[in-house]
Image: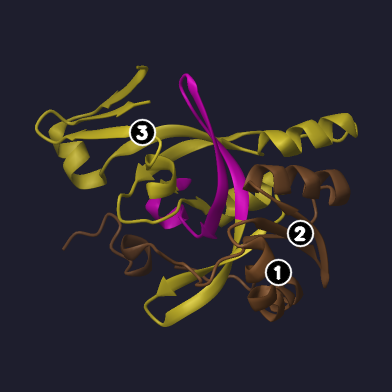
Chain colours: A yellow, B brown
Amino acid sequence: MPIYEVGTSQGVLLHLGPLLPIEVSVPQTLIDHLTSKGEPVPPTVSGNALVDTGASISVVDLEVISKLKISPVGVVRVQTTAGQVDQNVFPMRFKLPNLTIESETVVGADLKPHRIVALIGRDVLSRFVFIYLGGTGRIVLCF
Amino acid sequence: MCLEPILLRQELEFFESMRAKWLDTYKDKFVLVKGRDLVGVFDTFRDAYTAGVERFGNSPFLIKRVSEEEQVERFPALTLGVIHANI
């Protein structure tokens, strides 16, 4: 079973949470389409993603979605502090070392204030074993 | 959480108007809708997305699973603004 481990320190993990270096890109289906038409494929965006077991689906920064020029493919109902609202969802590709994840539906939100490009929710986590080693400041993904 | 105005409202309204009818024949399938047209019915999201991209390219279209109830997505840390909060 491949293992991806990120080590920081107990303090960093405590204050910043489980952060993973990640690449966000256009889904493979769209890459194939753009390539076949001779159109440019928007470059991958790199940054940190925060693993959030409280999020039912993953979230990507709106500016990143805009840079990737991915069109929405759906609408989901989202619970906010002001009630339930409809939000667009986008297909997305996440890349970790040795692993590419095609996510069907991510929501866009302004994540810049949090200095992250994505929140990894339970839709993605459903494919892994996720281990949070608070005492040693490490997180481990087994897939 | 910053809320953006959504696209695909026409497709969503069409889906909602057809949901009860489609539940009889397409329950748990993925429908591909553009405007007020049902373009296709698929077993998986991936198949629907591939068909949508082949037909419409990188433009908005709606893919939705035909189910009785709308699932509500939740992001408590984001919606409550408590990511990295020092409490």
Q: Residues within 10 Å of mark 3 (few under 14, many from 20)?
A: few
Instruction: Identify which residue, A135 or A130, lies in the foreground.
Output: A130
Which chain letter matches label 2?
B
- Residue B27: which numbered mark, if any? none
Instruction: Look at the image and tell me in which quarter the C terminus of chain B lies.
Output: bottom left
Q: CA distance from mark 2 to mark 3?
A: 30 Å
Q: Quadrant of residue A3?
A: top left
The residue at the point 79 percent across, 50 percent down is: B52
Q: Is residue A129 above or below residue B84?
A: above
Q: Find out whether residue A104 is within the magenta segment.
A: yes
| Gap in angstroms between the C-alphas marked 1 and 2 | 8 Å
Amino acid type for the residue under numbered disc 1 = Leu
Disc number lying in front (2 or 3): 3
Q: Secondary structure at mark 2?
A: loop
Q: Residue at x 46, y 78 (%)?
A: A84
Which residue, given by chain and number where applicable, does mark 1 sit on? Answer: B7
Q: Quadrant of the N terminus of chain B?
A: bottom left
| Residue at the farthest right position | A37
Q: Chain of mark 3?
A: A
A92 or A11: which is nearer to us? A92
Q: Secondary structure at mark 1?
A: loop
Q: Is residue B76 found left or right of B66 in the rendered image?
A: left
Residue B2: x percent and y percent? 50, 69
Indicate the amino acid at tag 2. Answer: Pro
Q: Look at mark 2 in the image and give the residue it sits on.
A: B60
| A94 relative to A74 in the view: left or right | left
Distance Cα–Cα, label 1 vs label 3 = 32 Å
Q: Which residue is mark 3?
A: A128
